[in-house]
Image: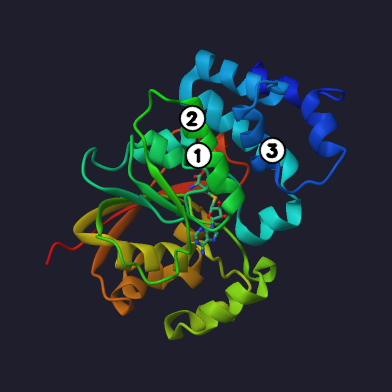
Amino acid sequence: MSTNPVFSCLRPGSELHRTYFAGSLGGYADSLLRALSGTDEPSAVADLRQAAKLSGPAGVYDGLAMLQAALMPEPERLAWGRYMSPYSLATAIAAHVPSGGAVVDPAAGMGALLAATRGGSGLEKSPDLVRCGRLAQRLCPDDAPFRLDEGDAFDPSEGPRADTLVANPPWVLRAELPPQALHRLAAHPRYADLLRHERFDLCVPLLVEAVCTRLKPGGRFAAALPVSIATEHIWTRFRNGDLFQQCGAAVSLGFVDPPDPSAFPIQFTLCVGQVSAD
Ligand SMILES: C[S@@+](CC[C@H](N)C(=O)[O-])C[C@H]1O[C@@H](n2cnc3c(N)ncnc32)[C@H](O)[C@@H]1O
């Protein structure tokens, strides 16, 4: 059993159990936020504060990720790839990009990667996770602030482009994709043939689109990807840069072994790359 104090909030009979497991699973972030601003703090928030004191952002983000894993219905997690990075993985990704400059995370979850890069801006599709990310920032007031907005990484980007992109994009195989995501991808001619493959994974188009539309020329990126992306034939056009080229950017990339392969239950690799400066 982990010694993370946040585990105590999941004990049967704890306030969290009474409040959340007994009732609806939705709206947990709202409830946590309400609790945080009230005088009568439930043990979950008190435990998160304690985790912040003991382990800084790692305690807060890993604690919130654990709550999210326990409270968000599994079908929702599976369909949208809502599996948060352990903070150790967030720092490993951040270590592969230069510090300084504008940072973006196109699928930011609660913002763990932005906390690890010490600032930047993130997009996240789930409003619950955006609220959790704001709660995390309130629990780590000494950390560099970052901006977290509800949004879709596939929407055209209107803001200025970033110097650096970090991501643990949603890993979702074709069979799990929600119909609206499937239809949207089918509209992109560059993914049509890949979509026919059962090993199709959402993480690739999301990363390609984000790199091509949100990074400056010369910008660098680092992303956690399932190891299949580095090895399987279906992803040759990702590895050799063709998919990026079709999306308008010349990109070079490589793969590095993660420092702690056990950080995630699925075998993964770190993809590190750069957009050509011309
Ligand atoms: C694997 S999680 C990683 C979250 C966070 N970057 C981290 O490392 O902890 C991927 C996130 O992408 C979000 N997501 C899925 N599709 C998205 C989209 N089209 N636009 C923005 N976010 C999306 C999911 O809700 C999920 O929170």
Residue at left offset 39%, top offset 41%: 114
Residue at left offset 34%, top offset 37%: 117
Quadrant that contains the C terminus: bottom left
Q: Are marks 2 and 1 in contact (CB under 8 Å)?
A: yes
- In terms of secondary structure, where does tag 1 sit? helix
Mark 1 is on which residue type? Arg
Quadrant that contains the N terminus: top right
Percent of width and height locating residue 154: 45, 69
User: Quick check: 211 left or right of 53?
Assistant: left
Query: Is disc 2's CB within 8 Å of ligand 1?
Result: no
Return the residue at label 3.
Answer: 31
Residue at left offset 63%, top offset 70%: 174
79 lies above or below 189: above
Which of the two residues, 267 or 218, is positioned nearer the viewer here? 218
Residue furthest to the front in view is 39
- In terms of secondary structure, where does tag 3 sit? helix
Q: Earlier in the sequence, mark 3 or mark 1?
A: 3
Mark 2 is on which residue type? Arg
Mark 3 is on which residue type? Ser
Return the residue at label 2.
Answer: 138
On residue 134, the disc is 1
Percent of width and height locating residue 262: 57, 35
Which of the two residues, 14 or 107, is positioned nearer the viewer here? 14
